[in-house]
Image: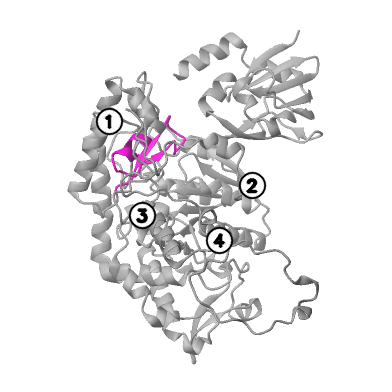
Amino acid sequence: MSEVRFTSDHEWIAIDGDIGTIGITDYAQSQLGDIVYVELPDSGRALEKGEEVAVVESVKAASEVYSPVSGTVTEANAALADQPALVNVSAEEGAWFYRLRLSDPAETASLMDRAAYDAFVKGLD
Amino acid sequence: MSEIVTLSGHRGLALEEPLLFEVGEPGRTGVDLPEPPPFDRDRLGGCARRAPVGLPCLSEPQAVRHYTRLSQKNYGIDSGFYPLGSCTMKHNPRLSEKMARLPGFADIHPLQPPQTAQGALAAIEALADWLKGLTGMPAVAMSPAAGAHGEWCGLMAIRACLEDRGQARRRVLVPDSAHGTNPASAAMCGYGVESIPANADGRVDLDRLKAALGSDVACLMLTNPNTCGLFERDIVEIARLVHEAGAFFYCDGANFNAIVGRVRIADLGIDAMHINLHKTFSTPHGGGGPGAGPTVLSAELAPYAPLPFVVRDETGLRLVEHAAEAARLGAKPFGRIKGFHGQFGVFVRALAYIMSMGSDGLHQASADAVLNANYLLARLSADLSASFPGPCMHECLFDDRFLKDTGVTTLDFAKALIDEGFHPMTMYFPLVVHGALLMEPTETESRETLDQFIAVIQGLAAKARAGQAEDFRQAPRFTPRRRLDETLAARNPVLRWR
């Protein structure tokens, strides 16, 4: 059973051992509106926590996605290139952006859990 | 409201317009050309065309009507109010157009010998002198062809200067309230971009700026007044901090319209700034013509200005076109950024505008632009939600708090405005507020126009509050096309006919 954590920039990360799966939250996709394009990182890319790693573009705006933790990209979700709309439908499951091997698992401690993130989003409205 | 359908698809005399490829028939033509002489196909080698070209074949009235009808569907500043924030859609004076059409200007060719183009070079010099005078800056690069091109020109000059100093500074700081093109220009120039958040006043957060400055920062790109329509009142302190860190201070001059004739850019500590002639000096843009973004430079950056540039010697005015010649004059141009020397037609219009206004007229124009924006802000603050308290500069910013729980979005509101006969304001920009509506009336609008616009906005806000969300979602209802499916167009663009 993986553990899910959230950032204040509306990314989620599901952690399974030293592998993290990252995407944007359902709240983020609802704010962006219809998503038309997603740019993903190449595997092998080394990321610092907070580094700009992907771009998501909707009819309203283009936004950057920041890596919640440091690590090396192992895989990107190729399905999103052809079907960016998947992010609107399944932001927190099928429409994950990339996976990485965590270089410092301790970094996840500073991220929010589900309850904290929900409270954070509530405060934004 | 029921959909009105006609047999033809036309509505009254607003005609449905097919593509040229969908009308006409093979062999039809508007001109009677003589039979060509016998043609020697062999001389074309294997390149002789085997299939028809596939151009539309039309009579002259078909072609004329097509373009006339398309022009009637266009909405421009000559048709009505165009309050697109951050774009300065002001009237383009007919006198400037007349000057640009003088045969000596209009019929000139960029490859003409300079001895035969002395008047044109003198016009470029005269405009350059005005721009230097209005900003207090010692030099100006005239060739950038648009605002973002000017940003890039300024950054290239900064990069060249830093390289000369042997400094490898890799970061450019861009506040959240800056123009959207700034981060793109910095990235194009090879810099890493770091954004500086705005404070609760909609201005640069000084503490965050201080924390971000360091020995690897090449420059700060600030827009002043910023895209919230606010004057960055800490600008002198910002300049001091930036220079103290050994970085340059770039200013995006897209909003120069609000301060021209009143603020000398050099006095603010700015090292480089582009001037959108198509905004501040009222030349056509936004589909009406190309822009121009001359970039003023400090004495330190001036030697790096791009080729070509105008010099005066004993033979008159001429263009310095090559690096070797520039080096003999003590300049170190970073290169060339455009085929010829800037957008000459725009220069003529801008110079005509400046000379017809005079410095007293420019001084009044910036005041009127600010007055008009504050009039909108004051009259609309009770109905919409102003993002920041006034006074504002040349544009006023609202967000979508007034639409909360109405089921109407900023987009719906803008579409409803089209049905009412107004071009919408800028939406969803700047990103520092939620569901932004940014309005820039400019100084060229009359009180009557602003009052009509205000009455419509107030009426629409009342409709939204009264729960008539469905009307908004249906809008626009009176345009040749209703709401387009932007999502489908972005996801599956059809880029060619058939």
| Residue at mark 4 | B56
Instruction: Single out the mark in the foreground, 1 or 3.
Output: 3
The residue indicated by pointer 3 is B72
Front label number (1 vs 4): 4
Circle 2 SS class: loop
Q: In x, y percent, where is residue B306? A: 57, 69
Alpha carbon of mark 2 to alpha carbon of mark 3: how far? 53 Å
Q: Residues within 10 Å of mark 4 (few under 14, many from 20)?
A: some
Residue at disc 1, secondary structure? helix
Above or below, comparing residue B172 to residue B414 in the picture: below
Residue shown at 31% from the left, 48% from the top: B394
Label 1 or label 4, whichever comes before in sequence order = 4
Q: Nearer the viewer, residue B100 or A73?
A: B100
Q: Is residue B419 magenta?
A: yes
Q: Say which quadrant the C terminus of chain A sits in.
A: top left
Give the secondary structure at mark 4: loop
Give the amino acid at mark 1: Leu
Chain to which mark 2 belongs = B
Q: x, y (%) of residue B460? A: 27, 30
Front position among marks 3 and 4: 4
Where does label 1 land, which residue? B460
Residue that carries the numbered disc 2 in the rendered image: B216
Say what secondary structure mark 3 lies in.
helix
State if disc 2 and disc 4 touch (CB < 8 Å).
no
At label 4, the amino acid type is Pro
Q: CA distance from mark 1 to mark 3?
A: 26 Å
Q: Residue furthest bottom?
A: B315
Q: CA distance from mark 2 to mark 1?
A: 50 Å
Apparent side of residue B179 relative to residue B214 in the rendered image (left or right): left
Image coordinates for residue B448, horizontal then vertical, percent: 17, 47
**Marks 2 & 1 on one chain:** yes
